[in-house]
Image (tube, rainbow, N blue to C red):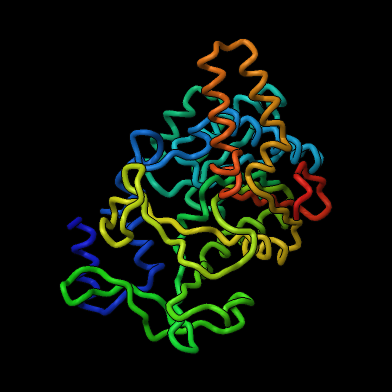
Amino acid sequence: MTRLKQRISGLIAASGPIAVADYMALCLFDPADGYYTTRQPFGAAGDFTTAPEISQMFGELVAVWLYAAWQAAGSPQDAVLAEIGPGRGTLMKDMLRVLHRLDPAFTTDVAMIETSPQLQDVQKQTLAASGANIAWHDSVATLPRAPLFIVGNELFDAIPTRQFVRTGAAWHERVVGTAEDGQLAFVAGPATIEAALLPKNAGKAPEGAIFEFAPARTATMEAIAERIAASGGAGLFFDYGHLEPGIGDTLQALREHKYDDVLAHPGEADLTSHVDFAALAAAARLHGLDAHMATQGEFLLALGLLERAGRLGASADEAARERIGGEVERLAGPDAMGTLFKVLAVASAGTKLPFPAVS
């Protein structure tokens, strides 16, 4: 039993079951024993590998998109280039390399939004030789009041979600309690959700079906949208999820690159759930922004992933070309990240963004 699991069990014994969102928050962000506050989860030595760690091409194409969005906004010289949830800093490192060549004026002020002191230290090491003026922030609220061009990769999936389980005619909040043997277990709590917040097909869901509702994710998008609406700019966000709301349990744990029981190792496994991109897009549109969605594969291929791979492989040996081909497949292939991962682009109304004509 992990130390955090002992503490959670004690909390439940003293105060009763806790909501799934609260369980996720403790597992991921507890100051003493949380997953993101006590370890470096990224890469082969961690528990999962993100797109920037798979290939430099990902960051390079994101940089091209941000540069085009900056130009479409009139190339504001006081713009802030930001990344939220920047992991080890690999994505920003690749973006800055490209942007310095395209126009150094776009990288005058760079912001990294990161709450983990440990990850901040890793990012500072990664970006030490970038030559950029980089500031670290705890939240979007402390960013300068200036046109904001922001990117987030696998950000929203780690923001805690609530879950509701169908019990008879009602949907009760799913909570974490303890079973007769003392182990953590999911149970239905007394709280229910308003019918207006459920998807259209909720009435056809079977007994025990799960609906995930993540107001904290919407609040994060609203904070970003408010900044862009007030000062101009654009945002680009990648995550695994769905383009339309639906019913289903997507809460999962990942430990040492393998799926794990969600309740087995609190604080030692990454907890995530699929992102409702339609809800994020709606939040952005409520603030007057344009919002567009696509799959990651559609987006990267439209930006020239195959052409970039061809240029990288032109002067490489056979082994390197095979590696590059494998990276393309992982990033954009329908059986890899290409379909599972989605992309949301938001910008001030009327900004002509480079984006596949999907939605």
Q: Using the image as rendered, state which of residue 152 and residue 322 is in the foreground.
A: 322
Residue beneath the point at 23% across and 74% down: 178
Location of the N terminus by quadrant is: bottom left
Residue beneath the point at 32% across and 72% down: 186
Q: How many marks?
A: 0
Horizontal side of residue 327 vs 66, given as left or right = left
Location of the C terminus by quadrant is: bottom right
Q: Using the image as rendered, state which of residue 282 and residue 251 is in the foreground.
A: 251
**Residue 309 visible in this rendered orientation of the protein:** yes
**Residue 146 visible in this rendered orientation of the protein:** no
Q: Quadrant of residue 41?
A: top left
* Image coords of residue 126 (percent x, y): 45, 29
* Image coords of residue 49 (percent x, y): 44, 38
Above or below — where is 195 with respect to 186? below
Above or below — where is 134 with respect to 219? above
Above or below — where is 45 with respect to 98? below
* Image coords of residue 346 (percent x, y): 70, 52
* Image coords of residue 108 (percent x, y): 64, 32
Above or below — where is 58 with respect to 265? above
